């Protein structure tokens, strides 16, 4: 574990100031009893926020069909694998007693699908049970027929953070207390958001795009980090960048190559026995953050493999990562009034 001085949070224009300036906000969240149109199955009590009010960046007219695969492995809880994301959305899960904190959650799936239940709804419900308003991002998959496929997921992540802040008043959220959290390829997306939040990846579409896309804290769980040989997950790399991408493209999409003094406090966890995504990428990101004296926690555990979500048995040290992330976020101002 490595602790550095906390990053001071930047002031940002809230939704009220946007309205005062006479600019329109994105569409309000719609109460959808089962959200069946968005996930292929029900998420009781959730609300849906569309990300893009009109044409989606990179839309080249490809016909994309939603597919949801119900899966279960051994004694693990059932999961839903979502493909065919034609219109990205945020699925909001609200706590009974909100404390002002929010989380943007990005499921993994190698950029070929999204583990919506295991790495989206399950951590969202855990966070909501502790007072956090959780937003699961159903983002576009780069290999499904988008122009600028290498930017499509990051465009959605940047836009999602801005939409959450634009709707902060609707959800009782403090726009300066938003966690970005991602698993596997979703960890690459969360890491890209944490390091490339200021990069202009799309033309502004409404007032929300005047808001910051920078997370206040970022948590990366067994993440794909680098696109460089020996450090990457090849399937994620090929779907994001295409096969035989040049070295310049690999570096441009590698999270560890974009660490600056504006990196938010960063939590990392990975298992040494991960046979899918090399732990070396996470270590490279840790070293890049450490070199610039940024606030970073690193937790490497001996056992866990890949894709363990919140399902490791209590006998494994890796099962403690949710509590460790919560304490890290609290120490960096995310859970201001919460006892952890």
Image (tube, rainbow, N blue to C red):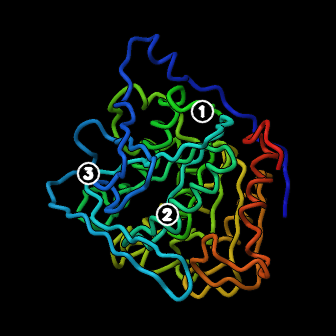
Check disc 1 and report its element: helix, strand or loop: loop
Quadrant of residue 311 within the rendered picture: bottom right
Can residue 153 be seen here?
Answer: no
Task: Nearest to the eye among marks 1 and 3: give it.
Answer: 1
Q: How much space separates mark 1 and mark 2, taking CA atoms?
A: 22 Å
**Mark 1 = which residue?**
173
| Mark 1 residue crowding within 10 angstroms, few (<14) / some (14–19) / many (20+) | many
Q: Residue at x 48, y 66 (%)?
A: 117
**Mark 2 = which residue?**
107
Contact, CB < 8 Å: mark 1 with mark 3?
A: no
Q: Residue at x 34, y 75 (%)?
A: 69
Q: Residue at x 35, y 67 (%)?
A: 82
| Mark 2 residue crowding within 10 angstroms, few (<14) / some (14–19) / many (20+) | many
Quadrant of residue 321 within the rendered picture: bottom right
Check disc 2 and report its element: helix, strand or loop: loop
| Mark 3 residue crowding within 10 angstroms, few (<14) / some (14–19) / many (20+) | some
Residue 286 on image: x %, y %: 72, 64
């Amino acid at each position: 574990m490595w602790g550095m001085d906390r990053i001071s949070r930047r002031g940002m224009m809230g939704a009220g100031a946007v309205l005062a300036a006479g600019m329109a906000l994105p569409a309000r969240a719609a109460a959808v009893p089962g959200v069946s149109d968005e996930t292929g199955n029900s998420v009781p009590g959730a609300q849906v926020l569309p990300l893009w009010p009109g044409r989606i960046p990179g839309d080249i007219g490809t016909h994309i069909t939603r597919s949801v695969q119900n899966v279960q492995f051994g004694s693990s809880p059932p999961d839903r694998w979502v493909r065919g994301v034609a219109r990205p959305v945020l699925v909001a899960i609200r706590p009974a007693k909100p404390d002002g904190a929010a989380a943007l959650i990005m499921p993994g799936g190698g950029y070929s699908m999204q583990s919506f239940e295991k790495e989206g709804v399950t951590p969202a419900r855990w966070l909501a049970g502790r007072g956090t308003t959780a937003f699961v991002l159903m983002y576009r998959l780069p290999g499904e027929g988008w122009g600028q496929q290498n930017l499509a997921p990051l465009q959605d992540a940047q836009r999602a953070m801005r939409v959450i802040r634009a709707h902060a008043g609707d959800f009782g959220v403090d726009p300066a207390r938003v966690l970005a959290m991602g698993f596997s390829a979703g960890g690459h997306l969360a890491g890209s958001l944490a390091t490339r939040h200021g990069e202009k990846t799309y033309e502004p579409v409404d007032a929300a795009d005047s808001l910051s896309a920078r997370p206040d804290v970022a948590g990366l769980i067994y993440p794909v980090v680098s696109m460089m040989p020996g450090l990457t997950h090849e399937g994620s790399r090929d779907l994001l960048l295409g096969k035989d991408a040049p070295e310049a493209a690999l570096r441009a999409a590698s999270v560890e190559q974009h660490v600056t003094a504006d990196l938010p406090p960063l939590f990392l966890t990975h298992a040494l026995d991960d046979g899918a995504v090399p732990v070396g990428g996470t270590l490279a990101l840790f070293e890049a953050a450490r070199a610039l004296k940024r606030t970073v926690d690193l937790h490497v555990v001996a056992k866990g493999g890949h894709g363990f979500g919140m399902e490791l048995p209590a006998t494994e040290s890796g099962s403690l990562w949710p509590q460790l992330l919560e304490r890290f976020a609290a120490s960096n101002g995310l859970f201001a009034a919460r006892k952890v």
